[in-house]
Amino acid sequence: MINVAVLGLGRVGPAHVRTVEGNPRAALVALAEADQAKLDRVAGSFPACATDPDYRAVLQRDDVQAVVICLPHWLHERAAIDAVQAGKHVLLEKPLANSVEECLRIAAVVAASDVKFTVGHTQHFYPIVAAAKRILDVGQIGRTIMGIDTWYKPHEPEKRPAWMLDRKLGGGMLLMDGVHMIDRLLWQIGGTVESVKAMNGNPVYPEIPADDTAMAFLQFDNGVVVTISRIAYRTGITQYGADYWGTNGQLKYRLPYGQHGEVGLWVGQGEVWQPVDVPNRDSLADQFDAFLDTIEQDGEPAVSVQHSVEVVRVMEAIERSGQTGREVVIER
């Protein structure tokens, strides 16, 4: 049994609390949240769980072995480093941090420690996304040539906390949604991104100091080229998924989001879309099980710090290209 604390009870925090509480291999022992009303509301369902408005106090508890960090993006670097230095195993919600510079500081601290550290890029545990990767890996559509990853969704800024609407605090849709898209592309395609040419800005909500729209062309070192197409609109119709073209067919998947659109995975060959049956699973529960496996078996994390640094590296390149209007060659 591994004793776990959840730090941060914002948008996704309560879901992680339920995931920890529902896992027979873990015990939920503490919660941290600066907003006392949120803390009281969530903690009310777990009367045996300790609470504190300061996550740092929770990190000092001897009965906490691992933490799930769900704090705002601008706190990721500090909280992650604090947790590692306190000797706690860490599952950190994506993104790893706001910038490559911050990510590399986290990576250095993790490398010097004995703790297990993984990043919550849950796309790795989405059944449809994982099944698509397996199809690509076995070459069912031949060698992958190109792809397009799309996410069109309502912005609804009135439903978001203030920090999500300020890029300086880690807000903006590129850090919110774009990193999901970059993550699954890196994972499914393999290799690294060599260069980026992008438009990234806030044409839909120019009054908000954070991006809402991006179109990016990515060139991989293995020859694959991919377009990221993303917008958080005022009004429209949701689409969420990816399409790949190979030397022997096509693959497409659509993920559940919003009120419209198809959901599923298909392989296209001979002018026919063949649906692929994918059993549904709880991605957060599977992600948490993988985290516990890493701790108990002294294994490698399902999503490494190094992979998560690369996600933010590509994200930064999209931002730079959007700012300059020029192609960005990524240096490592």
Image (tube, rainbow, N blue to C red):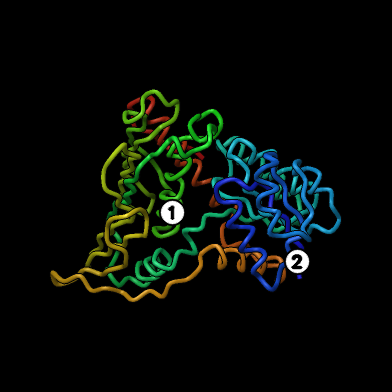
- Mark whose residue sits in front, 1 or 2: 2
Q: Is residue 134 left or right of residue 105?
A: left
Q: Is residue 251 left or right of residue 66?
A: left
**262 lies above or below 13:** below
**110 lies above or below 156:** below
Q: Secondary structure at mark 2?
A: strand
Q: Residues within 10 Å of mark 1 (few under 14, many from 20)?
A: some
Q: Quadrant of residue 79?
A: top right
Image x and y of residue 36, in percent: 70, 41
Image x and y of residue 224, in percent: 32, 53
Q: Which residue is mark 1?
A: 186
Q: Secondary structure at mark 1?
A: helix
* Distance from the alpha carbon under mark 1 to that under mark 2: 31 Å
Q: Quadrant of the N terminus?
A: bottom right
Residue type at tag 2: Ile
> At 69% from the left edge and 47% from the top edge, which residue is drawn?
39
Residue type at tag 1: Leu
State the mark number for residue 244.
none
Q: Which of 46/171 is in front? A: 46
Image x and y of residue 268, in percent: 21, 68
Image x and y of residue 102, in percent: 61, 37
Q: Which of 86/206 is in front? A: 206
Q: Residues within 10 Å of mark 2 (few under 14, many from 20)?
A: some
First along the sequence among labels 1 and 2: 2
Q: Which residue is mark 2?
A: 2
> At 32% from the left edge and 28% from the top edge, which residue is drawn?
203
Q: Is residue 261 left or right of residue 26?
A: left
Q: Quadrant of residue 243?
A: bottom left
> At 49% from the left edge and 41% from the top edge, which residue is drawn?
313
> At 51% from the left edge and 35% from the top edge, which residue is drawn?
164
Q: Which of 254/82 is in front? A: 254
